[in-house]
Image (cartoon, grey):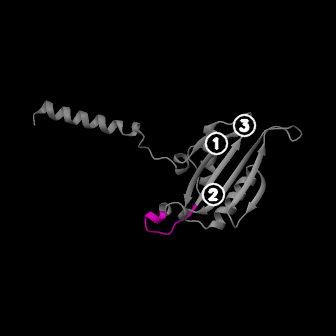
Amino acid sequence: MNRSRKSFVIGVACLVFAAIPATGWAVTEPCEKNFTVKDGFFDRKIYKTWQELLALTRQAIFMRTYTYLVKGGWVINLTDEETGVISASQTEGSSGSAGNMANLNVLVESAGNYYGGVASRRGVPAGFRVTMTISAPGGLAVHEDMVRKEFCAALAEIKGGTYAAR
């Protein structure tokens, strides 16, 4: 191979490898990849994400989630540890005003309910899937990026770590 052709091949290879990070090969958190936004009834927005947690018991996940929400100022409306449901709400505005209310539902269930879960495909027992859903009225100032970051921060803390993008 002559020198100019070798330089050309090396140059093309460098361009290809330089372009790889820009094409979306960067690793993201599962909660970011699973994040969705849908329009609901009466101008409501539905924000949702989920993540599988493998190294924790269902009870530990439930209690960590409950604690995280209470510390974050959520009012717990309903809990059912047996079914893995936590329902909470937050009101925007002062307590005496008729503020807009955001509703949060959390479901902790066996990851095996979903195609065997990520863990089962690797030949180890499935963990648990934590699904978080917020329903916010149209008049409530909610930014998609803020919700995504808060979901991921919550799931990271529940898992026992921290979320870098926060």
Q: Which residue is mark 2?
A: 158
Residue plotted at (73% across, 54% down) = 87
| Disc ID at residue 34 | none
Residue placed under numbered mark 3 in the picture: 42
Distance in Å between CA atoms under marks 2 and 1: 16 Å
Under circle 1, the secondary element is helix
Q: Is residue 22 left or right of residue 32?
A: left
Extreme residue in the right direction: 96
Q: Is residue 131 visible?
A: yes
Callout 2, which amino acid? Ile
Q: Which residues are magenta?
A: 119-128
The foreground one among 162 and 120 is 120
Residue lying at the far left in this picture: please name it.
Answer: 2
From the viewer's perspective, tell me whether residue 53 is left or right of residue 60: left
> Disc 3 marks which amino acid?
Phe
133 sits left or right of 98 in the view? left
Say how many tags the image has: 3
Which is more toward the observer, 125 or 55? 125
Residue 109 inside the magenta-drawn segment: no
Please state, as top left, top right, bottom left or bottom right, where the N terminus lies in the image: top left
Q: Residue placed at 63% from the left, 66% from the top?
A: 58
**In the displayed image of the protein, which residue is found farthest to the front?**
41
Residue 111 in the image: x percent, y percent?
55, 62
Q: Are marks 2 and 1 in contact (CB under 8 Å)?
A: no
Looking at this view, is 158 or 113 the one in front?
113
Location of mark 1 (residue): 147
Q: Main secondary structure of the magenta part?
A: loop
The quadrant holding residue 79 is bottom right
